[in-house]
Image: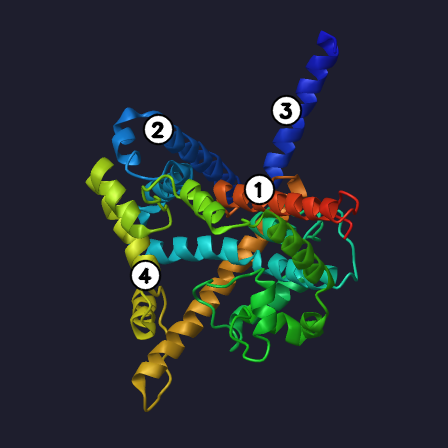
Amino acid sequence: MNQKVKLNFDVNLMKNNRKVSEEIPGYILENIEKEKKIGAMINEAKKELKTNPIYKEFFEKYNPASIDSFIENYALKKTRYLTFGEMLKENEENALIRRQMEAEERLWEVQRKKLFNLECQWRAEMIKIPEIEITLDFEYWEKNIENCPFLNPISQDEFDLYYQYLLSDEFNDFNLDFLWMGYMEIKESIKENDNIPPWYDYFDNHMGTGSLLWLPDVRGEREEYYLKVWKDYNSPKDKASAKRKKKIKNSDPRPNLYGHELSNIEEFIKRFENNKILEYFYLYEKELNTSNNELERALNILKEADEKVPIDQSEDWRSAVIHAAKRFEQRKLASACRQAYSQYLYRIKVGIAHEVHSSDSNITWAKEWSQQVKERIIQARTLLGEPADLNI
């Protein structure tokens, strides 16, 4: 590229960037800059944990295989504490931030349900998806749902249905505690309706897709067959061999250091961080995420309310308080989701990647585990004299 062409290219690029910036609302640009800053903070925290010798003695107490995962999780959590900790001191800001974060994550429930429905059809061999080779690939794309290439963007009709769900009596999912791609668990509990996410149930009832769960699991059964062949071939032939394998597997007696356990995070902060981060830890983890008492939660919501919340007359004041708080929270969450959807559409319009909510370690683990299972299936097919591929 000669100098004149390069100059014209740079000028046009600056004009295009300026035009895009003018089209994006200010709060979208602020969120994008915030995400860049958060990403840089996470990388800096990981670098510090991996290179600073002050952590060496602490990490040596634990199984080395668990350290990288702990570092990934801790770097993410520490960044959240520093980013939101100060604001969480104020109740009003606390509720606003919590709803914004929750709404941005909840919006992807729409895509998770669409992905789950595709899995039901794919398992029954009704459809083919180029990016899917085995059932575990669906788990990977659920973890990386924001980048899933074969899901259509969330349409206005789909969002409107989800918005209606958030305001409906069927909405009772305040904990986000579900196996979104738990195909076997969900299928086995159809009659009890225990493990089915409320949104899945609502979608099926309004879109008539509930019958997908009754489709046969053709692909899943074939995978199980080949995995059994692999397991039988690789199983130890005698007890002595089994003991040797077990000894090798458990050769490092040190415990694992789990980054999702709050006790480990608390111990690490007390040992290496300052009191401010410890305070932010209690605010973020203890107060926001550990209260399971329904009445206590309702009272906290009403205390944080930025408007008067009517409470219906009832012989049971506790039920009335819980119901009022639920309705208030639903309205606020639905409003936050509408803003999140607006941001989602702008990102698509200007070609900005969506924020990924799963950690890098979880996404990597899902991809690596899927690859291991693929290799086992191929090995089993080879043992049976079949082609060394996944066309099962």
Q: Label 4, on which residue?
A: 290
Mark 1 closeness class: few <14, some 14–19, many ≥20 residues within 10 Å: few
Taking depth in this image into account, of 44 and 35 the one nearest to the observer is: 44
| Residue located at (38% from left, 37% from top) | 67
Front label number (4 vs 3): 4
User: Which residue is denoted by mark 1 in the rendering?
Assistant: 368
The quadrant of the picture occupied by the N terminus is top right
| Relative image position of residue 108 (x, y in whole percent) | 57, 56
Real-space Cα distance between discs 4 and 3?
48 Å
Q: CA distance from mark 2 to mark 3?
A: 36 Å
Residue sticking out furthest to the top:
3
Is there CB contact under 8 Å for labels 4 and 3? Answer: no
Would you say 104 lies left or right of 18 here?
left
Q: Which residue is mark 3?
A: 14
Sequence-wise, which precedes: disc 2 or disc 3?
3
At which x and y percent is residue 81?
A: 33, 44
Identify residue type, mark 3.
Met
Nearer-N-terminus badge (1/3): 3
Q: Quadrant of residue 158?
A: bottom right
- Tell me whether circle 1 and circle 3 mark residues in contact (CB < 8 Å): no
Residue flagged by tag 2: what amino acid is it?
Answer: Glu
Q: Amino acid at mark 4?
A: Thr
User: Considering depth in this image, is 187 or 314 the residue closer to the camera?
Assistant: 187
Residue for badge 2: 48
Q: Is residue 252 above or below residue 157?
A: above
Task: Give residue 337's mark.
Answer: none
Asked whether disc 2 touches disc 3, contact meaning CB atoms under 8 Å apart, the reply is no
